[in-house]
C-alpha cells in the first residue's frame, strides 16, 4: 500500500493543495484512497466534507475509540501534515511514507525557512540514495518568467534535492478547493495546461 506524505514545517506553502490533488489523482484512477490529515487545522478533512458524492470517493481515517487507522480496503494513503511538525511526529510519518513531497513556493522567506528542514530530512535517511529516491520538492505557484522562480531553481540546485515538478500559479486550485474538487475531477480540456504540470509529479510518485 503506497503511502505518500506531504511535509513542510513552513505554513502556507501549499501542502493541502498538493495532498488533495495527489489523493484526487489516485481516486480518479480507480484506487481506494484515504486522505489522512494530521494537521490541527484539519484542512484536508474540511475539504473532504465539501467533496460531492458524485465524484470518485476519497476516504478519511477510521476512528475506533482511541485507534485511528486507514479504513479496510484502502490501497493508497496520502498524509497531509501540519506546519511546525515536531521531530517525533515527523519521525513517525517518515517511517510510514514510501514517498515524501515537500511543497515550496518561490518566495525567499519560504526558501530560507525550508533550507534547514531539507537537511533534517536528509539526516533522517540512512543513505543519500534513500533520501533521493523517496524525497522530492514540488514547486508551487511557480511562474517561470519571474526572478522568484529563478531563485527557487538556484536554491534547489544548491541543495541537490530531486524535483518532482512545478505547479503553475493559477486560480483553478483556489476555485476547485472551495468545492472539494481537484483538477483530476474536471474535463481534461478545461484544465489541460494545469494537468500537464502534474504529469512528472505522478511519474515520480509511481516510480
Image: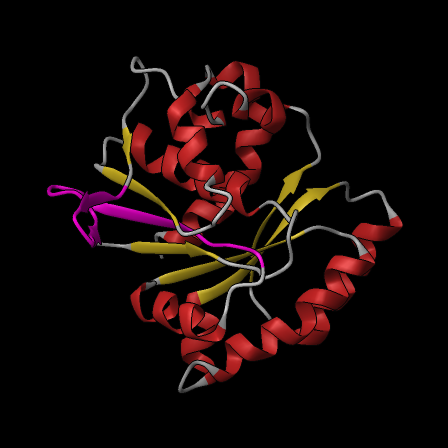
Is residue 160 visible to us here? Answer: no
Provide residue 14's location: percent of width, then percent of height.
60, 45
Foreground residue among 125 and 95: 95
Q: Which residues are magenta?
A: 61-83
Image location (x, y in percent) of residue 20: 45, 37
Position of 71 compared to 43: left or right? left
* Residue 126 to residue 38: above or below: below
The answer to whether residue 69 is magenta is: yes
Q: Which residue is the extreme one toward the bottom?
A: 126
Q: Residue at x 29, y 15 (%)?
A: 53
Q: Residue furthest left?
A: 72
Q: Is residue 173 magenta-colored? A: no
Question: Which image quarter is the N terminus in?
Answer: bottom left
Residue placed at 46% from the left, 14% from the top?
Answer: 187
The colour style of the image is: secondary structure
Q: Residue at x 42, y 41 (%)?
A: 22
Q: Position of residue 67 (x, y in %)?
A: 18, 54
Image quadrant holding the C terminus, namely: bottom left
**Residue 185, above or below 158:** above
**Image height check: is 112 above or below 41?**
below
Amino acid at each position: 500500500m503506497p503511502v505518500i506524505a506531504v511535509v513542510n514545517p513552513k505554513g502556507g506553502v501549499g501542502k493541502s493543495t498538493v495532498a488533495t490533488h495527489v489523493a484526487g489523482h489516485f481516486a480518479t484512477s480507480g484506487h481506494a484512497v484515504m486522505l489522512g490529515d494530521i494537521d490541527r487545522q484539519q484542512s484536508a478533512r474540511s475539504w473532504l466534507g465539501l467533496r460531492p458524492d458524485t465524484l470518485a470517493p476519497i476516504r478519511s481515517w477510521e476512528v475506533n475509540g482511541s485507534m485511528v487507522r486507514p479504513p479496510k480496503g484502502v490501497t493508497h494513503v496520502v498524509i497531509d501534515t501540519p506546519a511546525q511538525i515536531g521531530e517525533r511526529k515527523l519521525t513517525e510519518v517518515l517511517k510510514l511514507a514510501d514517498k515524501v513531497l515537500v511543497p515550496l513556493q518561490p518566495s525567499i522567506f519560504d526558501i530560507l525557512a525550508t533550507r534547514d528542514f531539507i537537511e533534517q530530512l536528509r539526516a533522517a535517511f540512512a543513505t543519500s540514495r534513500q533520501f533521493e529516491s523517496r524525497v522530492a520538492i514540488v514547486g508551487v505557484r511557480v511562474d517561470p518568467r519571474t526572478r522568484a522562480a529563478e531563485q527557487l531553481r538556484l536554491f534547489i540546485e544548491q541543495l541537490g534535492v530531486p524535483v518532482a515538478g512545478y505547479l503553475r500559479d493559477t486560480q483553478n486550485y483556489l476555485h476547485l478547493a472551495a468545492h472539494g474538487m481537484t483538477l483530476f475531477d474536471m474535463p481534461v480540456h478545461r484544465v489541460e495546461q494545469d494537468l500537464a504540470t502534474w504529469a512528472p509529479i505522478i511519474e515520480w510518485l509511481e516510480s
